[in-house]
Amino acid sequence: MNDITPVRDYLTDLQDRICAAIEAADGSARFHEDGWSRAPGDPSPIRGGGRTRVLRDGAVFEQAGIGFSDVSGDRLPPSASAHRPELEGASWRAVGVSLVFHPRTPYLPTTHANVRHFRAERDGETVAWWFGGGFDLTPFYPVDEDVHHWHRTARDLCAPYGGQARYDAHKRWCDEYFFLKHRNETRGVGGLFFDDLCEDFDQDFGYLRAVGDGFLNAYLPIVARRKDAPYGERERQFQLYRRGRYVEFNLVYDRGTLFGLQSGGRAESILMSLPPLVRWEYGYVPEDGSDEQRLADYLRPRDWLAEFA
């Protein structure tokens, strides 16, 4: 359990595999890598570095970002020590892969995934470790077939790790975490979310790999079905408006964003999740009976597998 190398190796390989798959699905643009590290003498309290990769202006993806990071520090930021006060004053190390893909057509959902491992030490002894992660889907014009496939894939990957009970718990956690309280709506149709998983290292690492590997199984079939969907200016403007909700969540509620910024992390890599274009509109109300109004019914916790069985 003290060797973080297998986790790190898995995460770098996962980043490579997802990049290759998304480039193939896009068929036009490629990821450009921005490797970074904290040089000796850097005033930041964070040590380490990472690989930030961004694909821009593709045929399918307006922007797709996926980053790997391996960072450490001598003291946890307030957002983390408040969550786990017993770790105050401990040194820490975190490795993870995080991605957000913003498609061009409004009919292909935005998506996010993250898998990570955290370890804290005091006086040379490990005082805590855990795995966290998940994936979620944010459609603007939901298609029931896509939502059902997304959740069926999530349920199936949970099968060796607690089965339906694991899926139910982490699906519920996702609904609760990705919730905009000030809007009284979920960020999308959910998926899986988990944190502080530290029961059995080998089993928990296996589940992390299942979630990381399952992301492509969940998302690529939706990409294939929706990537060429035509759209007009109305749909584009609604997409940009709804992207504003994504920004609101990430800057107000997301623990990973707060941890990265408060700990002195690299702002460009942390904020690569934000969409390249977005708009806000005061007092927007969709037309009665419109496809835009239909979205509201999807922005609440629902038993998607039972409804679409």
Image (tube, rainbow, N blue to C red):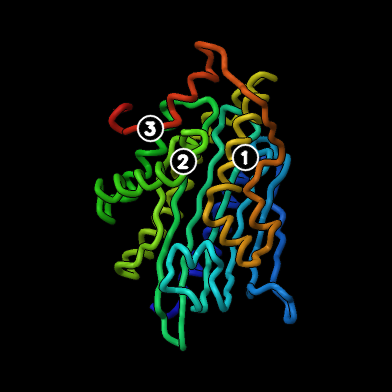
State which mark lies toward you, 1 or 2.
2
Residue at 41%, 28% in the rendered image? 145
First in residue order: circle 1 vs circle 2:
1
The span from disc 1 to disc 2 (Cα, nearest Å) is 19 Å
Residue tagged by mark 1?
102
Residue tagged by mark 2?
179
Labelled pair 3, 1 in contact (Cβ < 8 Å): no
Q: Which amino acid is tagged 2?
A: Phe
Residue at 66%, 52% in the rendered image? 271
Identify the secondary structure beneath mark 1.
strand
Relative to 244, residue 132 above or below: below
The C terminus sits in image quarter: top left
Labelled pair 1, 2 in contact (Cβ < 8 Å): no
Q: Quadrant of residue 2?
A: bottom left
The span from disc 2 to disc 3 (Cα, nearest Å) is 20 Å
Relative to 5, residue 209 above or below: above
First in residue order: circle 3 vs circle 1:
1
Q: Which amino acid is tagged 3?
A: His
Q: Which amino acid is tagged 1?
A: His
Residue at 53%, 67% in the rendered image? 95
Q: Residues within 10 Å of mark 2 (few under 14, many from 20)?
A: many
Q: Nearer the viewer, residue 295 or 282?
A: 282
Q: Residues within 10 Å of mark 3 (few under 14, many from 20)?
A: some
**Could you tell whether 80 is left or right of 192 in the image?**
right
Residue tagged by mark 3?
148
